[in-house]
Amino acid sequence: MGKVKKGSMASRKAARVNPTGVVEAEEADTVQPTSEMSILQKLASPSLEERHCSCLSLANIVLDEESATRLLEEDLVRKIGPLLVDPDRSVREAAAGALRNLSLCQNEKACEQMIAADVMTPVIALFVQAFGELKEPGASDATAAAAVAVAGSAVEAKDKAFAADRLSSCVEQTLHLLLNLIEASPVAVEVFNREGLLSSVIECVQPSQFSDAVVSAAAQCLGTVSENNPAAANIILSTPALIQHLTSLATSLAPTEANAHLQAMLACTLSNLVPNSSSDVQLSLLPIVFSVTAHALQIDGNTGISRVSASLVGMNEENQEESSDIKLLKSVLSAQQTVLEIMTNLCSIEDGGDDEDEEWEDAGDADADMEDEEVADDPEDATQSVASNGITSSIVVKHLSSALSEHQLLAKVAEKCEGVPSHLVQMLACSEAGRTVLGRCERVQCRALTTLQALSSALPVEAIGTADTLLKLWTMVFNAANQPGVSSGLLEALTGTLRSTAVLLKKTQSCVPVEHVHALCQACMVASNAQDVKINVLATLTVLGGILLAQPGQLDTLTVMAKCFVDSASHATSVRAVSEALDGVFDVFADGGEVGDAAVAASGMLASLRQLAPKLKTQLRQGPRSVGRDYPVLQSAHLNLVRFLKYMAKKSKGAA
């Protein structure tokens, strides 16, 4: 639980702004297939204008998934790829923009076709050529070009300024296209490494020399290509000038809203170097990463949201997306999402099951019908620390603990878990641009919750906080989960955090309010809740049940919990939810002492479970096809249920 895969194309595509276009994206829906074919044909036109306009049109058309699919079937990639090296710069830029948009579409075949068509070759050629020109003195400085008006004509100065902008845009488009291809294909990463582009991309990350758009695109590309890429990481680590450039830039930039995204991407790259570096280098990199993280999370998103809400009032819908306030807020939210992912990936420890053997799980007590059946191990049921990736776990824990104290990181992360206040939600929900911002805010909230789970797994409870701190954290997350209109994805993250917080509370022998336990039991019975949400709630109740057993006067609550477990096991449509509910039965009530046995009797648990056992056995006889991948889970659940019933029967006879 808690691991974030930064290479997820779906999440990154959702966060990016459409790069090019001379018409609105909605207009792409009105383009007919016959028009699309005509546009494709003009890609090979001898007319520069027709080639250029065709690329611009395609940049908008491919934003529509159906249109993109049709064009891919018509071999769009092979037809537009050669234009990346067209003699005219405007055509090259437009072709890069069209392919960039295509690489962002939800059709997984898009990037596959680009790689298969060897589009990396012209993309790299375009980047090398365009960046080579951009590095020439004065080429990237539109202001300097405009100053030519002093010595020459104003028309000539304007032309040079325009040419500088277009050259910079061409480099930006190419970097974004490279980023998307690298993110989607290991083959693209291999080509990138082989062609030695890393130093050039790092060279682009110079705010004093290149435009913000180029620097941002290069930083994002660098953050992606350095992930799980030892070859790239080793080049940086073995080249003092490169590592010095990245670290000095990350630490020298002022911690402002405008710089937050660039700093976050630099921190992302530095964190990607950690698994491949020596302990001495780790000791130098981690403080920088956590310092940048603290600065990014320090920014009050609600202040920016209030500013955006005010700026949207009376603004034309077409101008809202171009609002500087909205662009800045999106940049800040993207930075916060990135640093939260960095924290999670550095400190996350995968969930592991409880491997303690219970007395009632003695193999000799297994049902005869199950003797020849193997219970497959769940591949996820293993604890895997960050040390498995080459990172020295003790170093990460040390700096995490220090950062929590020095930068109040836990409080900052918890603050992002609260979400947007309801009055601001209402204001933003009135416009399309506002709803887009709300979507980004929810992604940050989900990442913050995932980070809390990772912190809970990686650090000792003392580093997280006292019992009072944990109870406040629990209450905050519980209240957020009970707000109306919470999406299923956010609810899954919230309930997952309740689960990890309950584990910490158990270590401090602290219990949550009884009414919260009853509310969680009721949540298991809500049909509309997703199965993953129910699984999280059931796992949380299992932990809380262990706490309640040690508390006096909890028979009624434990009885409600017992009924909840049995009802969930009997009526859940997911095999994993059935298994989780039964695990709750086993963990809480197998050896629950007098109060546990009393709750079992009061709830009528055993009678219900005896009725459930043959139903599970019938499912097993239908074979793996009946439940697919979850068949081993079903095997394990049935086997353990049989053992539990035998154990409880034996215990009852012993008591008599």
Image (cartoon, rainbow, N blue to C red):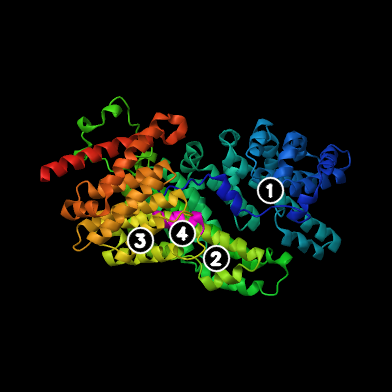
| Residue type (three-letter) at the residue carrying disc 4 | Val
- The percent coordinates of residue 600 (x first, y second) are 23, 51
* Disc with the residue nearer the chain's start (3 vs 2): 2
Q: What segment carries the magenta color?
A: 487-496
Q: Nearer the viewer, residue 111 or 272?
A: 111
Q: Which residue is mark 1?
A: 173
* Disc with the residue nearer the chain's start (1 vs 2): 1
Number of marks in the rendered image: 4
Report the predominant secondary structure element of the magenta stretch: helix
At a point 26% along the width and 27% down the height, the residue shown is 368
Q: Which residue is mark 2?
A: 257
At a point 57% along the width and 47% down the height, the residue shown is 10
| Residue type (three-letter) at the residue carrying disc 1 | Gln
| Residue type (three-letter) at the residue carrying disc 3 | Leu
* Disc with the residue nearer the chain's start (4 vs 2): 2
* Marking on residue 346: none
- The percent coordinates of residue 174 (x first, y second) are 67, 45
Magenta highlight on residue 237:
no
| Residue type (three-letter) at the residue carrying disc 2 | Glu
Mark 2: few/some/many CA within 10 Å (<14, 14-19, 20+) = many
Quadrant in the picture for residue 524: bottom left
Label 3 vs label 4, nearer the camera: 3
Cα distance, mark 4 to mark 2? Answer: 12 Å
